[in-house]
Amino acid sequence: MKRAATLSALVCLLAVTAAAPAAPETAPRPDRHDGTNATLLDSIPKRGVLKICTTGDYAPFTKRNPADGTYTGVDIDMARDLAKSLDAKPKFVATTWANLTKDVASRRCDIGVGGVSITLPRARQVYFSEPTREDGKTPIVRCADKDRFGPGALADIDKPGTTVIVNPGGTNEQFARAHIKKATIKLHPENTTIFQEIIDGRADVMMTDASETLYQSKIHPELCALHPEKPFTFSEKAYATPRGDDEFQEYVDQFVHLATHDGTYAEYEAEWMK
């Protein structure tokens, strides 16, 4: 009789245990840049270096001096400040628009900067910080040809006999491929010389971010930005960080938030746009 009662109690205990919800599994922290479970927020100050991927071909955000390999630009100044805040020195790593997010995702660098637009395909590869500014695609043409393109609508640009020039691998090419069907699309691999192609008459139009058209029209009086205040698209620029490192991404968020609200970012941008 006693044995039967014991077995009955055991059966009840097993039934209750089986019905109870399973304890949630704790997901392991992903491997970080140094192959450990450490966040970059801790490992960067320890190694004393912040590795920064940038293209160096997109003024006013990132510009590489071919003579000595040094970098300047709005986002270069911001990256230097970020490194300083982490008790680290900045180390700039050359990349291309086609490879920038891949380099960040593979941990070749800790962060990607330099006028990087947030896109959903890129957001599948990397985290993005809080935006630094709003932007969007708009045309830039020779000022002598402004009347030829009227108000600068896509229909005014996408015509036979018009050559639209783009740099490969980025959002400029994606926009042109999606919207230009009748005009000729010309690829030019050097973003630092692409505007000279328009000035010299080897191309007619480039559609790029309004911020870049304003800067280029300032340093090249022969060029005019069309409706930069009302671009074709809406986009935001931000900094790319490796997926899985929430602590570092949150720190970069806070860094950007402070710099865009205390006048630091605006001061750096004004130095290039004045």
Image (cartoon, helix red, strand yellow):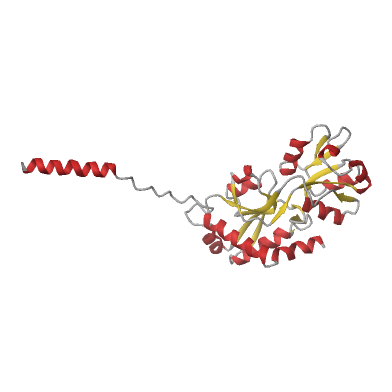
User: Residue 92: image x %, image y %?
Assistant: 67, 56
Up/down of 80 relative to 227, above or below? below
> Which is more toward the observer, 217 or 34?
217
Residue at 77 percent of width and 48 percent of height: 231
Left or right position of 170 against 44: right
Quadrant for the N terminus in the image: top left
Left or right position of 99 against 183: left
Residue at 82 percent of width and 54 percent of height: 214
Number of dots carrying numbers: 0
The single residue placed furthest to the left in the displayed view is 1
Left or right position of 66 against 101: right
Residue at 90 percent of width and 54 percent of height: 221
Up/down of 44 relative to 8, above or below? below
Quadrant for the C terminus in the image: bottom right
> Which is more toward the observer, 97 or 22?
22
User: Residue 50: image x %, image y %?
Assistant: 61, 59
Left or right position of 271 against 34: right
> Which is more toward the observer, 163 or 111?
163
User: Residue 223: image x %, image y %?
Assistant: 88, 50
